[in-house]
Amino acid sequence: MATIKIDGLKEFQKAIRAMDADLPKLLRVTFNEAMGLVIGYAGDHMPRRTGSAVNSLKPRSQQRTARITMGGRKAPQTPWLDFGGEGRRKGRPPARPFIKQGRYLYKGLAVKHDEITDVMSKGMADIARQAGLDVT
C-alpha cells in the first residue's frame, strides 16, 4: 500500500490551533484537495456503465488523515471493481481476480505521489502564512 507520512503533523496542527482555532479546519480542505488528485486518476481508469462507481469516490479527510470512501448503497460494486473477489453472492457478479493493492485508488496514490506531496506542502505553507508565520 502506498502511504504518505507527514512528520510533525500533530505538532503543526496543535501550533496553528493555538494561534487561531479555525486554521486546523483548513488541513482537512488541503487533504481533500490532494485526495481529489487520486479520485481523478481512479475515475479516469475505472470502468463505467452508469458512472455510479466513479461518483461514489469521495474525499473524507480529517485534520490528520487523508481518506477516500467508495461504494455505499448506490454503488456496492465499487470495492469489487477496484480489488476484485467473488462478489456479494457466489457467482454474481462473476469472480474477478483479487488484487490486494487494488486497480485504481492505490495505483492513483502511487502515480500521483509527487503531485499530492506538492499540494499538501503548498496547502500547509498557506495555512502557516495565514497563522502569521514566516514560511521559506
Image (cartoon, rainbow, N blue to C red):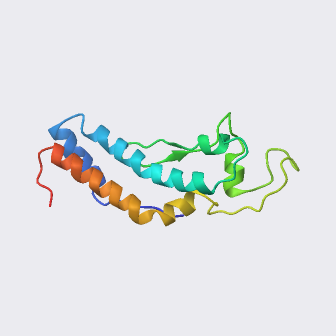
Name the side, left or right, on which 77 lies relative to 109.
right
Residue 56 in view of the camera: no
Q: Residue at point 60% right, 41% down?
A: 55
Q: Position of residue 44 (x, y in %)?
A: 59, 54
Residue found at the far right of this picture: 91
Viewer-closest of 129 and 85? 129
Q: Quadrant of the N terminus?
A: bottom right
Horizontal side, residue 31 vs residue 107: left or right: left
> Is 107 left, or right, of 23 in this rendering?
right
In this view of the protein, can residue 62 be seen by the observer?
yes
Note whether 33 is above or below 104 in the view shown: above
Please determine whether, in this image, residue 53 is positioned above or below residue 97.
above
Residue at 23% from the left image edge and 45% from the top image edge? 14
Instruction: Residue 43: give x, y in percent of width and height.
Output: 59, 51
Q: How many marks?
A: 0
Q: Which residue is drawn at 64% across and 42% down?
A: 71
Q: In which quarter of the image is residue 122?
A: bottom left
**Residue at the location (22% across, 34% down)?**
21
What quarter of the picture does the C terminus occupy? bottom left
Q: Which of 9 and 38 is in front in this view?
A: 38
Instruction: Point out residue 115 in the picture as x, y percentages from the top left corner.
Output: 39, 61
